[in-house]
Image: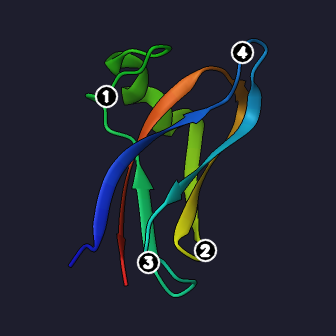
Amino acid sequence: MATGTGTAEVDFGAFPGSNEASVTVAATGVTAATHVEAWVMGSDSTTDHTAADHKYFPLFAALTTAPGTDSFTVYARSAQKLQGKWAVHYVWAN
């Protein structure tokens, strides 16, 4: 069962953007053994991208996670430079 869930934004920056972005989420109780998963939902939008943009995000970028101590990081990487903020959802469990 999930211990925590939520949303965050990864920011690839302004034009010309970047191939990598990350966001660190504070989460009390997270340890190096915690399981963390992140994904993008096609119904999300941010100040930079519409729901239609989010539907195609998985074609251009991949998400990975890394737990730490009382936090975890969501990494987004793309073969092409992306720009702006994208919404990501996460769930974690010990």
Q: Earlier in the sequence, mark 4 or mark 3?
A: 4
Furthest residue in direction front, as rendered: 28
Q: Residues within 10 Å of mark 3 (few under 14, many from 20)?
A: some
Q: Is 42 displayed left or right of 10 in the figure? A: left
Q: Position of residue 88 (x, y in %)?
A: 43, 42
Which dot marks residue 68?
Answer: 2
Residue depicted at 38% across the width and 15% down the height: 50
Q: Amino acid at mark 2?
A: Gly
Up/down of 28 relative to 86, above or below: below
Mark 3 highlights which residue? 35
Mark 1 highlights which residue? 44
User: Disc 4 versus disc 2: distance between alpha carbons?
Assistant: 28 Å
Q: Amino acid at mark 4?
A: Ala
Q: Amino acid at mark 3?
A: His
Mark 4 highlights which residue? 14
Residue depicted at 54% across the width and 66% down the height: 71
Splitting the image into 4 quarters, where does residue 61 fall? top right
